[in-house]
Amino acid sequence: MGRQPCCDKVGLKKGPWTPEEDKKLINFILSHGQCCWRAVPKLAGLLRCGKSCRLRWTNYLRPDLKRGLLSEYEEKMVIDLHAHLGNRWSKIASHLPGRTDNEIKNHWNTHIKKKLKKMGIDPVTHKPLSPSTDLQLEQQQKLSSSTVEFSDADENKENRTSTESPISDGLEQEKSITSELNAIEADALLSKSPAFCTDEVPLIQTHEILSPCASSSPAPSSSNSSLNPDEFRFSSMEWPEILSLGELDDFIRWDSICDR
DNA sequence: AATCTAGCCAACCGCCAGGAT
DNA sequence: TATCCTGGCGGTTGGCTAGAT
């Protein structure tokens, strides 16, 4: 038979997280890494669903998250990626280090959509909304000239919409996009880093968080739960408020937790 | 100063794929 | 092989805040 249910949802707290709850969750993840989200709330002393804990961690508490608005470059990346991948926010987020799918989704819905509409571009299809005026054409040219180019993918761009083709094209296209983007991102991020919204620099760099044993692994993306606990162990680091909370020794290792 | 409105964003909900039993 | 659970994903909601009246 299968496993036990994630949570019974009875008597569980919902709504905004309190600082206390955050502390408990951070404490727990710091000392045990990410594993068995179902067990986290119980062992961390939280009246929350495991799912809620995972979401809180990945979208808000993860130390490698960037804060603040998306930079102009990140915004362009999002637009280009959306044109190719559609509403696959997690895929898009995986190309933007330190950004979460939720954050990108929100930013798309609240800022980028409006921006594109203003420019006469359909945010869904990435095509002109109506017969373009000179102004709209000019704006579109500006946008396209400043966006990240996809050599192969762009050739077919005209014939498809974000909702149909990018998804239906399947994994092959995504792979090519991904490999192109990796190269593009590396260059672009490096070359732009001096002006890369300095107030959005992550509070803590990934390499400062992960212990040497995990150094061969890439920085955790929005979905890094596949890491085994030994690969995802925090090194001793400064984390105001958190490390002073104590109680860490009271927890047991994930190995034994997961066996239960 | 009080009320209303719109925008933003954190969090929830429901579905799905993959894995465990 | 069938059943069930987990983790992940995208869509949606609701509360908070700032600006307008």
Image (cartoon, coloured by chain):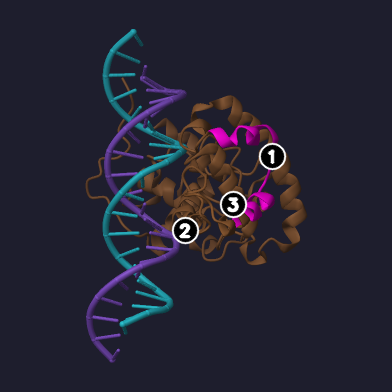
Chain colours: A brown, B purple, C cyan
- Spatial distance from mark 1 to mark 3, Cα to Cα? 15 Å
Contact between marks 1 and 3 (CB within 8 A): the answer is no
Q: Which mark is residue A182?
A: 1
Which of the two discs, 1 and 3, sits closer to the camera? 1
**Residue at the spot 52% in from the left edge and 66% down from the top edge:** A241
- In which quarter of the view is residue A194 placed? bottom right
| Image point (59%, 36%), residue name | A157
Q: Earlier in the sequence, mark 2 or mark 1?
A: 2
> In which quadrant will I find the N terminus of chain A?
top left
The 10 Å Cα crowd at callout 1, few under 14, some 14 to 19, many 20 or more, is few
Query: Residue A144: x percent and y percent?
Result: 64, 49
- Of marks 1 and 3, which one's residue comes earlier in the chain? 3
Q: For the residue marked with disc 3, what is the amino acid?
A: Gly
Q: Magenta region: which residues?
A: A139-159
* Residue A188 shows up from this direction: yes
- Vertical placement of C1 versus A195: above or below? above
- Determine which residue is flagged by label 3: A98
| Closer to viewer: mark 2 or mark 1 | 2
What residue sits right under mark 2 in the picture? A114
Tag 1 subunit: A
Displayed quadrant of residue A259? top left
Q: Judge whether residue A155 is colored magenta.
A: yes
| Helix, strand or loop status at disc 2 | helix
Disc on the earlier residue, 3 or 2: 3
SS class of the residue under badge 1?
A: helix
Q: Residue at x 49, y 39 (%)?
A: A88
Residue A152's quadrant in the figure? top right
Are the residues under marks 3 and 2 on the same chain? yes
Position of A43 compared to A122: left or right?
left
Q: Amino acid at mark 2?
A: Lys
Q: Which residue is drawn at the image coordinates 57% and 48% (left, top)?
A: A78
Q: What is the distance, in whole Å, between disc 2 and disc 1 at their CAs? A: 28 Å
